[in-house]
Amino acid sequence: MNINAKAYRLGDLNNETKFIIKTVGIDAPDMLPDDVPDGTEVALVDRNENQQSMENLNKMRCTATMLTKLYRESNFAIDQKMTFLLTSAILSDTLHFRSPATTTDDRNILKYLIPLDKIDNITSYANSMFEVKSGLTGFSTRQILLLDYKQYTFNNQTWGIGTGETCSMNKILERNDELLKEMNEEKKRFTRNFIFNY
């Protein structure tokens, strides 16, 4: 492709991403600087959700699925570290195919990557990723509420919807009263009509 590009990140790494890059043995991308020169081409790479997408758009659940297809279409060799990262991204975004938004392409691409990534047990590795991601020790109630939080407007009402992922449901249930209090405070703080967290 011969494009001179560099990967950056826009925010702090979550625990799952830290686990993945430590396991594969690479450094985290630098933070995107505030002083990017005017005219610099910047491509935001992220998975699309249906609400953020367009009609008749070819939807892929995971950016890693699209990237792997581009590698293959261009006949580029994918090294083991890259296949490990691509595998991890697909497992994360599709919740190891438990997400209803998983596509056939995601399944087929992961099947292609598995012999190349040298991960001994995909299920065990995926479970380790999810356990790390869902560990909430050290998180404030507000941080838990805003871990995967988005704002939506419909029927002239503003809704805040958040998703908390955990493998230890009892731990989150122990903080139920704290979360309800924080949700009410968030609703008042930003004049939301409703806040929903699941």
Image: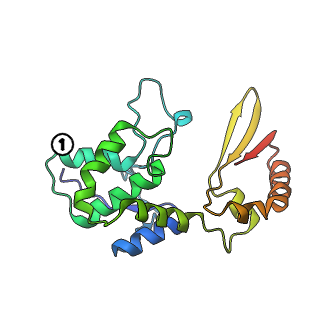
Examine the rendered structure and indicate whether residue 194 appears above or below residue 178: above
At 16% across and 53% down in the image, what residue appears?
76
Q: Is residue 68 left or right of residue 161?
A: left
Location of residue 146 (image quadrant): bottom right
Examine the rendered structure and indicate whether residue 183 appears above or below residue 139: above
Q: Is residue 1 left or right of residue 49?
A: left
Q: 113 or 30: which is nearer to us? A: 113
Q: 140 or 54: which is nearer to us? A: 140
Q: 87 or 6: which is nearer to us? A: 87
Say what secondary structure mark 1 lies in. helix
Mark 1 lies on residue: 73
How far across and down, in percent of the image, does residue 108 sit? 29, 43
Label 1 Cα neighbours within 10 Å, binned few <14 / some 14-19 / many ≥20: few
* Residue lying farthest to the left in this orientation: 75
How far across and down, in percent of the image, does residue 5 sit? 29, 58
Location of residue 134 (image quadrant): bottom right
At 83% across and 62% down in the image, what residue appears?
178
How far across and down, in percent of the image, does residue 143 sit? 69, 63
Residue 34 in view of the camera: no
Q: Amino acid at mark 1?
A: Glu
How far across and down, in percent of the image, does residue 68 sit? 27, 49
Number of callouts: 1
